Amino acid sequence: MKVLISGGGIAGLTLAYWLHHWGHTPIVVERAPHGRLGGYGIDFFGTGYDVAGRMGMADQLAARQLPTDSVCYVDGSGRVTARLERRLLERVIGGPYLALMHTTLEEALGEAVRDKVEIRYGHRIAAIEQRPGDVDVAFADGGRESFDLLVGADGVHSVTRELAFGSEERFARHLGFAMACYPVADTYGLGPRRVHYNEPGRQTVLYPTGRPGELIALFLYRTSARSVPRRTKRRSALCSAFSDMGWLTPQLLAAAPQDDLFMDSLTQIAMPSWHAGRVALVGDACGAMTLTSAQGASMAMAGGYLLAQALHQHDDHRAALHAYEARLRPAVQQRQQRARTFARSLVPATGIGLAAQSTVTRLVLRDAFTGLLRRGYGDTTSILTRT
């Protein structure tokens, strides 16, 4: 089967690897000219770690972990008020856990498919036409080509989804938050820690990237806006939202880049079906969970693996797409629900809520509350244990 994958991120590259493994011909188109740049830190465990292990990537990823041994919560003066040690976090996860940069995982997946899968960088689809025996795809550069199947792995703002299923607003569930992040110089002496500072409705986070002298500054804040400003307005919008924030926030805002600043709303995608005819969706394109789930990358790999597996196990593409969705949808919906619940407690809207959060955090970050913490992380076990 000749399969076009729109999107060269985690879901798309995982799908390409396993389609090639099971004898299909995947072709990936990625709109970025040389692969995706920039990124942020992710928690990686459960199903994603299982898939990475089956691809022989687990040791490679472990060697490139972020150099963090704890998650700390601080007050405005930088005094630690609560700490989650890595030892306890691994106990909460109940299995292997890696802290990675998002781009580290994408780079490893890119290496895994190199010389096996055709990847066309700087390309994107512009229109599609489904026919009984194939799907005809028009590309933005004017070219056309036919495929047995088209898979949208192009993220929460998927163009493939819009072309085949309709506008994003039909499926978007806005959580009432926005985030921004960018690298900054490590001049703060934080050591091997991820540090969180909260004020009502806002949170500043700082952690090492693994590159000498570099940190990621991440900002999360409540907002009623359903989209973020255009790129040239993002820096001023971020500075306005955090203008009177304490701790190291003023210094971090001063270091914000003028143009290359990643910003997005926290938006989940919920759809009645993930496939229509010869078009299917995978990863954030059909089941975005947001960063508050801590499992977006893991479930993107799960989707790529399970979709390829279903196409391997079923001769008919319709049966394969039904099987893929039936297997994965319950796990995605469960994690989406937990992410919505966690988001509300992660950044309290009021001073009273923040004081309650601080008290509870100091109380529960200990071994006796492992079970409670595990529920906060959602289902941490692999959904592939039955295969």
Image (tube, rainbow, N blue to C red):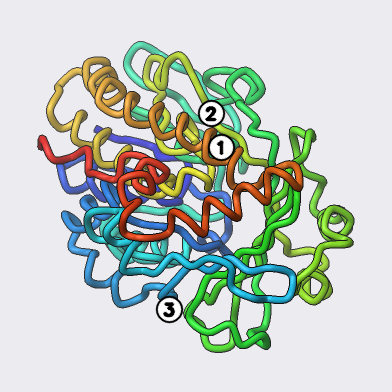
Residue 354: x and y, percent? 68, 49
Query: What residue is disc 3 on?
Result: 67
Task: Indicate which label's residue lies in the foreground, 3 or 2.
Answer: 3
- Residue at horizontal 37 percent and vertical 44 percent from the top: 372
Query: What residue is disc 1 on?
Result: 156
Question: Considering only order in the chain, which callout, 2 or 3, is on the residue closer to the N terminus?
Answer: 3
Which residue, as the protein is rendered here, is positioned at the far top?
Answer: 132
Task: Indicate which label's residue lies in the foreground, 1 or 2.
Answer: 2
- Compare residues 17 and 213 and report the one nearer the observer: 213
User: Compared to 70, does 222 lie above or below?
Assistant: above
- Residue at horizontal 32 percent and vertical 37 percent from the top: 303
Quadrant position of the N terminus in the picture: top left
- Marks 3 and 1, Cα distance to the nearest angstrom? 29 Å
Residue 376 appears left or right of 162: left
Task: Indicate which label's residue lies in the foreground, 3 or 1.
Answer: 3
Callout 3, which amino acid?
Pro
- Marks 3 and 2, Cα distance to the nearest angstrom? 32 Å
- Compare residues 213 and 242 and report the one nearer the observer: 242
User: Compared to 352, does 238 lie above or below?
Assistant: below
Residue 269's disc is 2
Callout 2, which amino acid?
Ile
Specify the quadrant of the image occupied by residue 207.
Answer: bottom right
Residues marked 3 and 1 touching at CB (< 8 Å): no
Residues marked 1 and 2 touching at CB (< 8 Å): yes
Q: Secondary structure at mark 1?
A: loop
